[in-house]
C-alpha cells in the first residue's frame, strides 16, 4: 500500500526557532512536494524536488528551504519560524514519467508558531 | 493550467448518488481533469482522472462533456465517510511540470 508519512501531526514552536518537517515515502517516487494549506487559500506549493539533491521553488518559497539527501526523504526547513508560518503543511510524492500521475499525500503536520 | 469553478458546498443523502459538478470552460486539448478529496484533518486523496472519455474506478465515475468544458464526479452510493472537500483540477501532463493547482473545492456533506 502506497505510503507517505510525516514526522509529526502537530507541532508547536516559538518565533525564531529553526523547524524541521520530515517526509518519507516508500513508493520509490522521484518527485516530492511540500505544500501549505490555509483556510480560503487552498493548497500552495512551497518547494518540490524531482531528484536527490535537486529542488525547485514553488509559489511561496520565501522563509523556507528544503533538503533531499535520499530519494525517499524530503525535508522542509523553516530557518527562523514566524507566526505567519502557522499552517497545515502537506507533503506529497509522485512518480516521474509522462506526467499523467496522481500525487500521494501524507497526513499533514499542523504547525503553530507562537 | 485552466481555471476550474465548483460550487462551494453540497449536501447528499446517505445511500444516494452524489453528483459534483466542475466547470472548466477554458480547458486546452491536452489538459486532463483530476479529482481529489480531502477528509477533515487529512491529506488530499486522489480519486480519478480523465481526458475526454468517461472513466470509472472503484471509488467514483467521471463524466466529461463532449466539448470538455465541464465534468461531473459521481459517487454512486454516498456514505457518511464520503463527507469531505472535493477538488477538481485541470492540468497538462507536460514533461518537467508537476504542479497541481488546488482551488477551494466543494464541501460535500453526506447526511444520515
Image (cartoon, coloured by chain):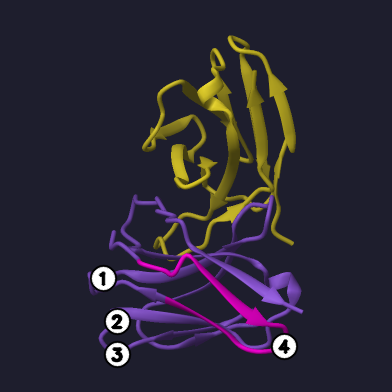
**Which residue is found at the position 40% from the left and 50% from the top?**
B99
SS of the residue under disc 3: loop
Chain given the colour yellow: A
Q: Is residue A72 left or right of residue B104?
A: right
Looking at the rendered structure, the secondary structure element under dot 1 is loop
Circle 1 sits on which residue?
Answer: B27
User: Total marks drawn?
Assistant: 4
Task: Find numbered disc 4 in the image and state the secondary structure of the residue it sits on.
Answer: loop
Q: Please name whichever residue, B112 or B75, is drawn nearer the observer in this view of the structure.
A: B112
Could you tell me if the residues under marks 2 and 3 are in contact, i.e. CB atoms within 8 Å? yes
Chain of the residue displaying label 4: B
Residue B15 - label: 4
- Alpha carbons under labels 2 and 4: distance apart: 29 Å
Q: In this view, does A71 lie above or below A53?
A: below
Q: Earlier in the sequence, mark 3 or mark 4?
A: 4
Name above or below for residue A73 compared with residue A12.
below
Q: How far apart are marks 3 and 4 (CA)?
A: 29 Å
Q: Where is residue B73 in the image (x, y as percent from the top left)?
A: 50, 80
Label whose residue precedes the other's in the sequence (2 or 4): 4
CB within 8 Å, label 2 to label 1: yes
The CA span between labels 2 and 1 is 7 Å
The residues colored magenta run: B5-21
Q: Is residue B21 above or below residue B96?
A: below
Residues at marks 1 and 4 on the same chain: yes
User: Residue A45 lies in what quarter of the image?
Assistant: top left
* Chain B drawing hue: purple
- Kind of element beneath mark 2: loop
Using the numbered discs, state the Cα–Cα distance from disc 2 to disc 3 in whole angstroms. 5 Å
Q: Looking at the image, which residue is at 54% across and 14% down? A: A79
Mark 2 vs mark 4: in front: 4
Amino acid at each position: 500500500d502506497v505510503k507517505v508519512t510525516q514526522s509529526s501531526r502537530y507541532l508547536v514552536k516559538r518565533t525564531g526557532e529553526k523547524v524541521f518537517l520530515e517526509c518519507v515515502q516508500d513508493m520509490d517516487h522521484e518527485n516530492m512536494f511540500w505544500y501549505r494549506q490555509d483556510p480560503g487559500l487552498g493548497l500552495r506549493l512551497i518547494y518540490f524536488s524531482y531528484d536527490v539533491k535537486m529542488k525547485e521553488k514553488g509559489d511561496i518559497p520565501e522563509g523556507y528551504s528544503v533538503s533531499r539527501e535520499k530519494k525517499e526523504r524530503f525535508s522542509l526547513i523553516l530557518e527562523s519560524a514566524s507566526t505567519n508560518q502557522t499552517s497545515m503543511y502537506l507533503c506529497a510524492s509522485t512518480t516521474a514519467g509522462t506526467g499523467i500521475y496522481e500525487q500521494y499525500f501524507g497526513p499533514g503536520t499542523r504547525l503553530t508558531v507562537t | 493550467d485552466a481555471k476550474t469553478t465548483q460550487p462551494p458546498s453540497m449536501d447528499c443523502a446517505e445511500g444516494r448518488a452524489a453528483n459534483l459538478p466542475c466547470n472548466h470552460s477554458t480547458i486546452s486539448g491536452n489538459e486532463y481533469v483530476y479529482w481529489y478529496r480531502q477528509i477533515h484533518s487529512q491529506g488530499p486523496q486522489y480519486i480519478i482522472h480523465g481526458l475526454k472519455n468517461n472513466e470509472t474506478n472503484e471509488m467514483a465515475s467521471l463524466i466529461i462533456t463532449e466539448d470538455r468544458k465541464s465534468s461531473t464526479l459521481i459517487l454512486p452510493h454516498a456514505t457518511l465517510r464520503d463527507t469531505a472537500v472535493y477538488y477538481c483540477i485541470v492540468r497538462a501532463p507536460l514533461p518537467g511540470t508537476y504542479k497541481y493547482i488546488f482551488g477551494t473545492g466543494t464541501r460535500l456533506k453526506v447526511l444520515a
